[in-house]
Amino acid sequence: MNKLTGYDEYETLYVRGYHRFSKAYHNLYDDISVMFGIYGINEGTKGEMSVKWEDLGHQHLTAKLCVYRDAMIVLASFNDVFQYIAKKYENKHYSEEQFCKCLDECGFIDLTEYERPLATRKEEMYKKQEEMWQHKQREMKLKKIIK
């Protein structure tokens, strides 16, 4: 496959996407706000990079881009994103929200897990119910012993 997105020879779909870790139900990375790149829908990535906003003491947060070694070809394919930012903000400060809007407008898919998956919530619910049941059983045994 000579293009970065679309289906490969294994019929895995690759898309341009991003994760907003600052908004996800799980915050995997405290030091990364947004991770974006080209992701396989079922597995893997062709490369990704991260952006975080740092306080440099100028009363504004400044975006800092970190590109991982294996993502250089992906970085080169994101020229539209950087052209959009350069044109829209002309070296001005922009927020995480504005950056994600830029990604949306450039055709990226928001892959953020904003809520815990239902299966996980059900598992937690069952676990809590089981713990509560065990607690009640211990209470009943203690009451019988005390009597």
Image (tube, rainbow, N blue to C red):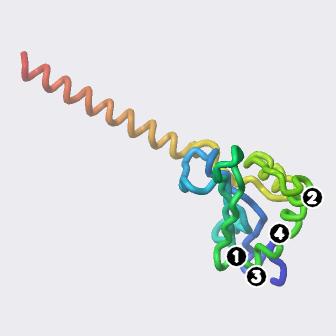
Quadrant location of the N terminus in the rendered image: bottom right
Question: Badge 1 local density, few (<14 within 10 Å), some, or many (20+)?
Answer: some
Give the SS element for disc 4.
loop
Q: Earlier in the sequence, mark 3 or mark 1?
A: 3
- Using residue 119 as the reference point, say whether residue 12 is left or right of it: right
Inter-mark Cα distance, 1 to 2: 24 Å
Residue identified by numbered label 1: 71
Question: Badge 3 local density, few (<14 within 10 Å), some, or many (20+)?
Answer: few
Q: Earlier in the sequence, mark 1 or mark 2?
A: 1
**Res. 106 in view:** no
Residue identified by numbered label 4: 78
Mark nearest the camera among 3 and 1 is: 1
Residue identified by numbered label 3: 9
Inter-mark Cα distance, 4 to 3: 23 Å
**Res. 64 in view:** yes
Q: Earlier in the sequence, mark 2 or mark 4?
A: 4
Q: Earlier in the sequence, mark 3 or mark 2?
A: 3
- Using residue 27 as the reference point, say whether residue 62 is left or right of it: right
